[in-house]
Image (spheres, coloured by chain):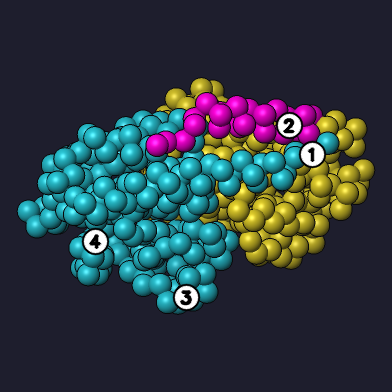
Chain colours: A cyan, B yellow
Amino acid sequence: MTQPAPRIVTVRQNILRANDTTAAENRLMFAQAGVRAINLASSPGAGKTALLERTLRDLSGQLEMAVAVGDLATDNDAARLRQWGAQAEQIVTGTICHLDAGMVQRVLPLFNLAELDVLFLENVGNLVCPSSYDLGEAARAVLISTTEGEDKPLKYPTMFNTADVVVITKMDIAEAVEFDLGLCRENIDRARPGVPVIEVSSKRGTGMEAWYDFVRGG
Amino acid sequence: MTQPAPRIVTVRQNILRANDTTAAENRLMFAQAGVRAINLASSPGAGKTALLERTLRDLSGQLEMAVAVGDLATDNDAARLRQWGAQAEQIVTGTICHLDAGMVQRVLPLFNLAELDVLFLENVGNLVCPSSYDLGEAARAVLISTTEGEDKPLKYPTMFNTADVVVITKMDIAEAVEFDLGLCRENIDRARPGVPVIEVSSKRGTGMEAWYDFVRGG
């Protein structure tokens, strides 16, 4: 009547093991080239692309940056990012709901890693599946916007659990949406005790210095 | 070096075939009991639970309603919904990013289907994976909030493609977040030509009549 759950679990484990091997290869390539790879994950519409646009604009001339961006369809995000003079390559994932290490590895030949300082890996908008897939990144940033509700870190623990930093976005409309910052920070800390939290408005440019320190690896 | 993609595709197809069989069983049970099952899907934080809270409150006494709600962790949503006097059962999905027909089937014995008019199946917050899993529902509602960006129907076509109705939520803050309603409606129509679109604010109660007509099956 129902699905053979144990078999699916085995298959998932095999897929994840294969992914981890490829991720280790990516990590080695990034280390050898001296590139800091940052994996950005969030819900759809939390503002990953807006944060990257601001970052590319503000740090241009200080850091050599590029982006690989995953989407099910469209290359809207890559087009938005290229406006700021950085190389941006789209990974079209089709019906796959996350980036995996193989997708990243296949797009790497398009970049000149030796010339880069930072490579952003903008994940598919999804607070669940990307959490299980190591891309070989040096650090993982999870974004949550003030419009999503303060309970999201508790409801999506697998994603927040794996974050090296949590970025609260759209702080400029926090008041309009009656966002409870204290509660949100408390829930983030319950999901991932001690994780650094940065509050930003990509639109107004507030709070960006703490984010730029993270981007630089500080 | 990379994952054996064809094998994954085969496994996915087998999983989906097993799911469709179970979904057909669910659909038959719902039909025999005279229950209208409605699958609600959206990004995290788009307001599925808020819409249901308002619905349970406003239609109480007119319709017998209950909810099965999926979340990776926590039973916050079920607790919120029970406040309005309706039965709400939590399906904890663990690391699984969507409801499937088997999860729904396993929770059905907790309900007295013969007494129900409507059973809401509130999916895990995810604009990708739930699209592939038929739960046996009579109709599928996809929610998009005014805070997510007008391009989401184009970026997540698999989800919007399968919608029987699209509900635009949080209309009360549309102005504060500079939401472009015309553009959003245009993009919804490109992803799913002719699909009915309903604009609501669950907070203020605006636009709810069109949604209630849909709930009743009108």
User: Is the C-beta separation of discs 2 and 1 under 8 Å?
Assistant: yes
The spot of residue B172 in percent (x, y) is 48, 53
Instruction: Give the residue pinned by disc 2.
Output: B18
Disc 2 to disc 1, C-alpha distance: 7 Å
The single residue placed furthest to the top in the displayed view is B193
Q: Residue at x 42, y 77 (%)?
A: A194
Find numbered disc 1 in the image and state the secondary structure of the residue it sits on.
loop
Please give left or right for residue B105 compared with residue B174 in the image. right
Disc 3 to disc 4, C-alpha distance: 21 Å
Q: Which residue is at the front of the view, A156 or A32? A: A32
Query: Which quarter shows the C terminus of chain A?
Result: bottom left
For badge 4, the amino acid type reads Val
Q: Quadrant of residue A101?
A: top left
* Residue A215 circle label: 4
**Mark positioned earlier in the residue sequence (1 or 4):** 1
Labels 3, 2: one chain = no
User: Image height check: is B135 above or below B170?
Assistant: above
Instruction: Give the residue pinned by disc 1.
Output: A2
Q: Which residue is at the front of the view, B17 or B194? A: B17
Residue B17 among those drawn in magenta: yes
User: Is the C-beta separation of discs 4 and 2 under 8 Å?
Assistant: no
Find numbered disc 2 in the image and state the secondary structure of the residue it sits on.
helix
**Mark positioned earlier in the residue sequence (3 or 4):** 3
Give the chain letter at badge 3: A
Give the chain letter at badge 1: A
Disc 3 to disc 2, C-alpha distance: 39 Å
**Mark positioned earlier in the residue sequence (1 or 3):** 1
For badge 3, the amino acid type reads Pro
The spot of residue A6 in percent (x, y) is 72, 45
The spot of residue A12 in percent (x, y) is 59, 44
What stretch of residues is rendered in magenta? B1-24
